[in-house]
Image (cartoon, rainbow, N blue to C red):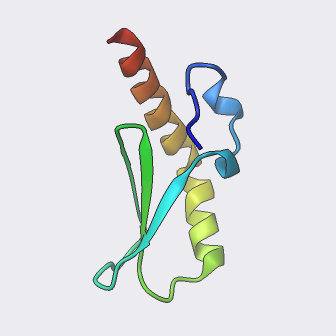
Amino acid sequence: MTMDLHSFDLNSLDLDLIAIERRVHARARRLKLVVSAGKVRLTVPPRSAERHIQAFLQQARPWLLAQLQQQAQHAAQQ
């Protein structure tokens, strides 16, 4: 599902509405969240507990929303 980030306030977005590609990587030692070209990727170490992943995403929410907002503004200018 593709969302038009220009059509609503990102601060009111729920993390469940954001498509986050989750990748389990054997050499990963920590959770890593990357935003590139409007896509969000979460790299997860093997055997990571789901509760730790969800806590990480909640903690990273302000940063993630700011990144998405910045990319949406940049795309609108072009």
Q: Quadrant of residue 59?
A: bottom right
> Could you say which is closer to the camera, residue 45 or residue 1?
1
Q: Position of residue 12 (x, y in %)?
A: 71, 32
Q: Position of residue 43 (x, y in %)?
A: 40, 68
- Most extreme residue toward the front is 1
> Could you say which is closer to the camera, residue 67 or residue 62?
67
Q: Position of residue 68 (x, y in %)?
A: 48, 34
Picture quarter with the C terminus:
top left
Q: Is residue 6 left or right of residue 74?
A: right
Q: Is residue 58 positioned above or below 39 on the image?
A: below
Q: Is residue 70 left or right of residue 62?
A: left
Residue at 38%, 20% in the rendered image:
75
Residue at 56%, 20% in the rendered image:
6
Q: Position of residue 33 (x, y in %)?
A: 42, 57
- Most extreme residue toward the left is 27
Residue at 57%, 58% in the rendered image:
57
Q: Is residue 32 positioned above or below 25 on the image?
A: above
Q: Quadrant of residue 53?
A: bottom right
